[in-house]
Amino acid sequence: MGMRTRGSGSNDPRLRAREERARREAAALPPEPVAPPASAAEARAAREARAAGSTPTKRSARDVAAVRAARSERATPQRRRWSRGKVVALVLSLLLVGLAATAVAGFSWLRWFSADDAADIQGTWYLAGTSTPIEITEDRINLTKDVSYRYALDTGDKTIAFTFTNLAGSGCYRFSLDRNQLALVDGSFTGGDTLGRDIGWTLEALVKKLQGETLAPAEAGAEGLTLLSRTPSGGA
């Protein structure tokens, strides 16, 4: 008949007391916190760490994610500022290009397409400040009944060529904005020469027009200038 050793076996009151006390203490302990699921950034950091040959811990993955988030927060305002600056620069550039294109188109229309030079030059003109008439036809300038010479216009370059018997000459011409005054200037001119001269004059003439005045097509008294007007004036 077997004998039980003192202090052994489940019937020992002291052993049962100790086991009961251990169960009560275990029940009184707070539950262990459950680790939150890994975020996308942590999972990406973990994959990169594994690819590099190391096994990341939760703490290292979170550190990597935090660094990336800080970098993103620092970079985002800078990208936004550059984006706003580029938009403003683009808008200003387009505005300047539009204004320049409008000015060029307006000047081109006024100089080449708003009127017919070949038709407007014909008719009766008077030497500016006199009542001396000069008749201009389609191909001749008649100074008097007995004196006339042929002419030809280049309406693109704004130049004029004329011949008298065996003599030949050339020059450039310009109408006033109201087409009631005409300037003929002797000399040799190219299209670029007349264009450069007309840009500044046109701007000044437009300003004068806004002020209710008319700018003469050339300054009186200039060398080689013949200034004509549709209206006669006193004097010979």
Image (cartoon, rainbow, N blue to C red):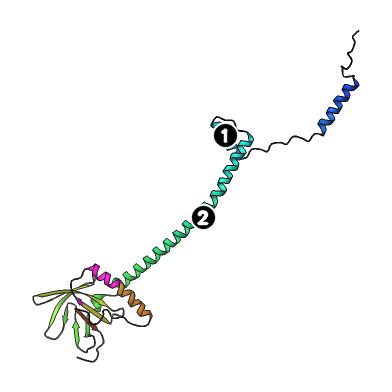
Q: Which residue is mark 2?
A: 81
Horizontal and vertical percent position of residue 54 = 57, 30
Q: Which residue is mark 1?
A: 47
Q: Quadrant of residue 106?
A: bottom left
Work out which residue is located at the far left of the displayed protein and give it.
Answer: 166
Is 211 on the left or on the right of 21, as rendered? left
Q: Quadrant of residue 8?
A: top right
Q: Is tag 1's residue or tag 2's residue first in the polypeptide sequence? A: 1
What amino acid is found at the position of numbered circle 2 in the picture?
Answer: Arg
Which numbered mark, 1 or 2, is in the foreground of this view? 2
Q: CA distance from mark 1 to mark 2?
A: 33 Å
Magenta segment, which residues? Answer: 185-199
**Viewer-proximal residue among 4 and 175:** 4
Residue at image coords 54%, 52%: 77
Residue at image coords 54%, 50%: 76
Is 32 on the left or on the right of 50, as rendered? right
Say which element carries label 1.
helix
Residue at image coords 21%, 68%: 190
**Mark 2 nearby-residue class (10 Å; few <14, some 14–19, many ≥20):** few
Say which element carries label 2.
helix
**Mark 1 nearby-residue class (10 Å; few <14, some 14–19, many ≥20):** some
Quadrant for the N terminus, please. top right
Compared with 18, 170 (above or below) is below
Horizontal and vertical percent position of residue 95 = 42, 64
Residue at image coords 82%, 34%: 28
Horizontal and vertical percent position of residue 215 = 31, 80
